[in-house]
Every structure is written in structure tokens, then in C-alpha cells.
Amino acid sequence: MKISADSIIQRNEDIISSEIDGETVMMDSSFTSYFGLKEVGTLIWQLLEEQHSVHEICERLTDEYDVSFDQCLQNTLPFLEELHKQQMIEIQN
């Protein structure tokens, strides 16, 4: 499924994560996949604790960082698609 600005996304509940020094470390429950997220990825991961649309995520990111909405969307969609490919997130629509 292709992710768009209107897609509603949240974390896969089977993912274990922990924040260390402002970065997030994530593993699947079988301990076969490991990911590390830096500052922006960590903020996105925190937001995905609850369901949010990609549009809402980008609105929050543009409030926090000096980036246009279009640029944010262009950078965020591939990141979310990779998380989805790795089964770290779920698309609700």
C-alpha cells in the first residue's frame, strides 16, 4: 500500500523501542530487525504512539524545524514507507 499525506499511521505494537540520548533504538519482538533513529525520526516515532495522518506529522515537524511543508512531505514519505516495509508501522486506511 502506498502511503500518502492522508494516510493514517501508527506504530506496530510488536515493536520494542527505547530512547537513548535523544535517539531511538527499535527492535521487532523476534529480535531479528534493529533500527536506530536520530532526532527527527525519534520525533516521528513518538508521534506514532497514537494514530496520526502523514499531514499531521508534517505539520508538527514544520512547527519544530525550519522546513517547508512540501519538503517535509517529500522527506517523510520515503522514511515512513521504509518503516512500513520493515513492518515497524501500520497503515490504518
Image (spheres, grey):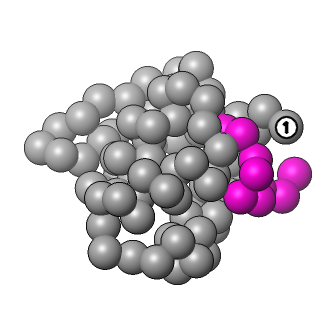
Residue 58 lies left or right of residue 82; in this view the side is left
Q: Is residue 11 above or below residue 35?
A: above
| Quarter residue 53 falls in | top right
Residue shown at 52% from the left, 50% from the top: 57
* In magenta stretch: residue 2: yes
- Magenta residue span: 1-9
Q: Is residue 39 above or below residue 8?
A: below
Residue shown at 18% from the left, 46% from the top: 22
- Depth order, front residue of 40/72: 72
Element under label 1?
loop
Location of residue 82 in the rendering, given as x and y in whole percent from the top left corner: 63, 58
Q: How many marks?
A: 1
Q: Which residue is mark 1?
A: 93
The reply to whether residue 72 is in sight is: yes
Q: Is residue 88 above or below residue 15?
A: below
| Quarter residue 14 falls in | top right
Residue 41 lies left or right of residue 8; in this view the side is left
Quadrant, the C terminus: top right
Location of residue 69 in the rendering, given as x and y in whole percent from the top left corner: 52, 72
Location of residue 4 in the rendering, given as x and y in whole percent from the top left corner: 76, 59
The type of residue carrying mark 1 is Asn
- Depth order, front residue of 57/1: 57
- Depth order, front residue of 62/77: 62
* In magenta stretch: residue 82: no
Q: Is residue 91 above or below residue 80?
A: above
The reply to whether residue 28 is in sight is: no
Residue 39 lies left or right of residue 76; in this view the side is left
Could you classify mark 1 by the number of other residues whose Cα lies within 10 Å: few (under 14), some (14-19), or many (20 or more)? few
Residue shown at 30% from the left, 67% from the top: 65
